């Protein structure tokens, strides 16, 4: 792919369009960045510093700069500059999350299995939400713990409740009951994932998040921007499980009467492949719904924010 002239802090793609954001996030979740060494990371950081100070060595291309920025953004938090724990990076979401999705979609699971996989899924989601949060304002860990426990309670309660209701439904034919039961994780995970991000970031509604101008200069802290960021994140989290947890059951049902009946041992490998495919596709599709660096009209914000700038729009990091 071609590389446009490098712009520090910008994207290779047009983030004002959905297709541009989709390509951007496909780039962001590239799992190859998980294997970048500390030496390579420091080289990338140094290269970007040299670009800022206009001391780049000869022979450095736009491709080198774009790849360096991609590596740094994939590993370091944009607000704190700290390394994100590997399983909680966006590049690690699919590799570390796929085994959990396979567990959620196990056929005819026991209640213990349902509870375990729902707990593990929400624990992973909580880690991703915390690691990729907007960190411009300090927040006590206790608030995140409360959000995490609330999300786990919601997911387990919905999953167990729906499973028990379906198993006790005498009016459903056995075949239909089996089909319906395979889709139980979808509403449980969709509701819990939305609750997870709301509970873990609810404090932002009271404290606000930082807004910046076009040149990335801090302007102030806005509760209105926090509400917009949380709404966008909740919508993203609600949509994300839909393709992840609906495509694999449909694929398995398509092969169940022929291939899987003859070769039942192929069920788990086929399920794993289907989950990996759907997860890898669903993640960029969902997180591209809204820009990470979202903009909001200055007229929508608090009067004290409006008084600090004459620019028509300001920006905020909604997180991932």
Image (cartoon, rainbow, N blue to C red):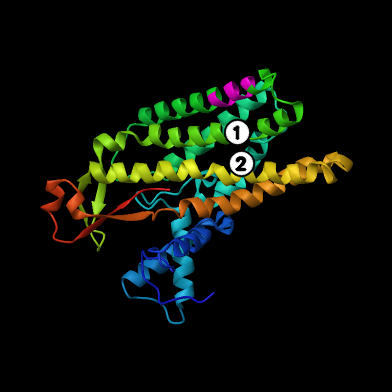
Q: Residue at x 35, y 48 (%)?
A: 318
Q: Earlier in the sequence, mark 1 or mark 2?
A: 1
Asked whether disc 1 touches disc 2, contact meaning CB atoms under 8 Å apart, the reply is yes
Residue stretch rendered in magenta on the structure:
158-165
Q: Quadrant of residue 104?
A: top right
- In the displayed structure, would residue 35 be above or below residue 136? below
Label of residue 245 in the image = 2
**Closer to the camera in the image, 258 or 107:** 258
Q: Position of residue 92 (x, y in %)?
A: 56, 49
In the rendered image, the residue lying farthest to the front is: 171
Q: CA distance from mark 1 to mark 2?
A: 7 Å
The answer to whether any part of residue 291 appears in the image is yes
Q: Residues within 10 Å of mark 1 (few under 14, many from 20)?
A: many
* 161 in the magenta segment: yes
- In the displayed structure, would residue 140 be above or below residue 64? above
Q: Is residue 270 left or right of residue 72?
A: right
Q: Residue at x 25, y 51 (%)?
A: 211
Tell me which secondary structure the magenta stretch mostly adopts: helix
- In the displayed structure, would residue 131 be above or below residue 218? above
The answer to whether any part of residue 42 appears in the image is no
Q: Residue at x 70, y 18 (%)?
A: 170
- Residue receiving disc 1: 185
* 59 in the magenta segment: no
Q: Position of residue 119 (x, y in %)?
A: 56, 29
- In the displayed structure, would residue 73 be above or below residue 93? below
Name the secondary structure under disc 1: helix
Q: Quadrant of residue 314?
A: bottom left
Q: Residue at x 36, y 29 (%)?
A: 143
Q: Position of residue 305 (x, y in %)?
A: 15, 49
């Amino acid at each position: 792919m071609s590389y446009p002239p490098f712009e520090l802090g910008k994207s290779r793609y047009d983030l004002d369009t959905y297709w541009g954001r989709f390509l951007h996030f496909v780039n962001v979740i590239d799992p190859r960045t998980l294997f970048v060494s500390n030496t390579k990371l420091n080289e990338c950081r140094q290269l970007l510093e040299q670009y800022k100070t206009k001391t780049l060595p000869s022979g450095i291309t736009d491709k080198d700069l774009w790849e360096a920025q991609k590596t740094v953004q994939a590993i370091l938090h944009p607000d704190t500059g700290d390394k994100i724990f590997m399983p909680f990076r966006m590049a690690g979401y699919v590799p570390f999350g796929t085994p959990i999705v396979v567990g959620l979609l196990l056929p005819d699971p026991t209640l213990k299995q349902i509870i375990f996989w729902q707990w593990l899924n929400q624990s992973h989601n909580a880690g991703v939400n915390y690691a990729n949060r907007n960190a411009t304002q300090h927040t006590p860990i206790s608030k995140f713990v409360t959000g995490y426990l609330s999300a786990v309670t919601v997911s387990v309660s919905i999953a167990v409740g729906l499973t028990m209701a379906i198993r006790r439904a005498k009016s459903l034919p056995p075949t239909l009951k089996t089909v319906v039961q395979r889709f139980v994780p979808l509403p449980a995970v969709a509701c819990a994932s939305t609750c997870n991000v709301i509970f873990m970031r609810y404090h932002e509604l009271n404290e606000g998040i930082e807004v910046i101008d076009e040149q990335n200069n801090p302007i102030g802290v806005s509760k209105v921007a926090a509400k917009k960021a949380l709404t966008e994140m909740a919508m993203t989290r609600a949509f994300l499980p839909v393709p992840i947890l609906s495509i694999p059951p449909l694929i398995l049902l398509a092969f169940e009467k022929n291939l899987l009946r003859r070769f039942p041992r192929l069920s788990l490998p086929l399920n794993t492949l289907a989950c990996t495919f759907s997860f890898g596709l669903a993640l960029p599709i969902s997180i591209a719904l809204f820009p990470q660096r979202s903009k909001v009209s200055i007229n929508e914000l608090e009067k004290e924010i409006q008084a600090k700038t004459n620019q028509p729009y300001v920006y905020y990091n909604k997180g991932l």
